[in-house]
Image (cartoon, rainbow, N blue to C red):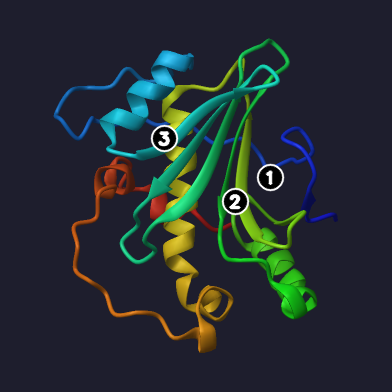
Amino acid sequence: MSLVRTSISDSSTRGSTRASSATSPRGRALQTDQQLTIAAIAQLLSDFDIAVGSRQERAGAHVWDLDLDGERRRGLKVTLIYEDRPDGVLVAWAHLAPPLGDGLRKAYRQLLEWNDRFLFVKFGIAEDGRPVLSFELHAATASRDALREGLARILLIADLLLDEMAPWIWIGGRMPADDAAPRRNRPLLSADPRLPARLEG
């Protein structure tokens, strides 16, 4: 199994993200299984207070650079790509740590183990050596709920594995003290209370 992501279409996940109903953090009922559009993606990011660093269009694909806060993992950088065409994909990958360098071989084995452990996501190593966590859906059939669940799944897993990934992120694996700042994306994490129990296979 290759763990290297070379393009936005060069990956697969163990199944497809399942959609589920949710309620907006603003108390407004969300339409379930709403087919995605550029406007619907922008609205979802706004509804769940997901910080967008930039939005670009590259070779016909719409790209958002996101910044997500979990309960433990803060400032997780996620790239979201949406290809608005019948054979396009919706893919998001989180940059879990800086390039691994000398620890690449050991990390590779760990990523393989996590691939077997967690459902509907794929761990990999980017071309620059950074470990990444991704999910992918068919753009034509992806829904708002599926995107919301996919982003929440990535953030929940990043929270869960923070202790194990700490040596990749901080020198000596020493996590900085929690600054107790508000977690912006708690509504995203709590939109489906059943999701934490469905992360692992």
How far is disc 3 from disc 2 in space, using C-alphas? 16 Å
**Residue 90 placement, left or right of 190:** right
The mark nearer the N terminus, 1 or 2, is 1
Camera-nearest label, 3 or 2 = 3
Question: Compared to 160, does 41 lie above or below?
Answer: above
Decide which of 175, 200 is in the foreground and name it: 175
Query: Which secondary structure, mark 1?
Result: loop
Outermost residue to the right: 1
**Residue annotated with mark 1:** 14
Mark number displayed over residue 148: 3
> Can residue 21 be seen at all in this image of the molecule?
no
Query: Which secondary structure, mark 2?
Result: loop
User: Where the N terminus falls, by quadrant?
Assistant: bottom right
Tell me whether circle 1 and circle 2 mark residues in contact (CB < 8 Å). Answer: yes
Say what amino acid the circle numbered 3 marks.
Arg
* Residue depicted at x 69% and y 72%: 100
Mark number displayed over residue 37: none
The mark nearer the N terminus, 3 or 2, is 2
